[in-house]
Image: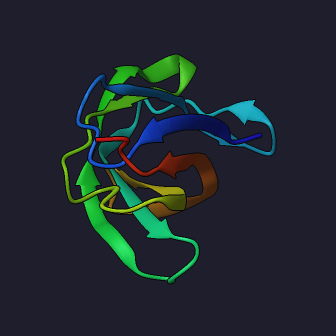
Amino acid sequence: MAVNFRIVEDNTAPAYTITCTRDGSALDLSSASTITLIIKNNASGTITQAGKAATITSATSGIISYTADATDFPSAGTYTADVKVTYGDGGVEILYGQCKWKVRSKIA
């Protein structure tokens, strides 16, 4: 199941911790060379990030971290991220809907 975050638009901290899963089990990322996020605004269908770098925090547990910038969640709405794993042998796996954000407008 995807991790759900509730944030305010333009948040850039803290870093988000995500456990990459395949069929409900944590994915071993030991052979991964790069991890990126593909973030989409669900309402508009706009891709806000097509290759946002993430850091592997615990490879064997599938845990990554990602720090947003102001362009990732520019407006209120819901966003979904797929995680793109590129392995050392060049293989690519895109993990479907690994996390979701519900973003509200700033009060002030």
56 sits left or right of 70 in the view:
right
Q: How many marks?
A: 0
Q: Is residue 100 depicted above or below 64 in this figure? A: below
Residue at horizontal 50%, vertical 83%?
A: 44
Tell which of 81 and 108 is nearer to you: 108
Percent position (x, y) of residue 23? 80, 45
Residue at horizontal 48%, vertical 70%?
A: 41
Tell which of 60 and 57 is nearer to you: 57
Tell which of 43 and 25 is nearer to you: 43
Percent position (x, y) of residue 46? 41, 81
Percent position (x, y) of residue 56? 34, 28
Residue at horizontal 76%, vertical 31%?
A: 25
Q: Is residue 82 depicted above or below 19 in this figure? A: below
Percent position (x, y) of residue 62? 53, 27
Quadrant in which the N terminus is drawn:
top right
104 sits left or right of 38 in the view:
right
Figure quadrant of residue 37: bottom left
Q: Is residue 19 depicted above or below 45 in this figure? A: above
The residue at the far front in this view is 108
Figure quadrant of residue 16: top left
Quadrant in which the C terminus is drawn:
top left
Q: Is residue 71 depicted above or below 55 in this figure? A: below
Colouring convention used in this rendered image of the protein: rainbow
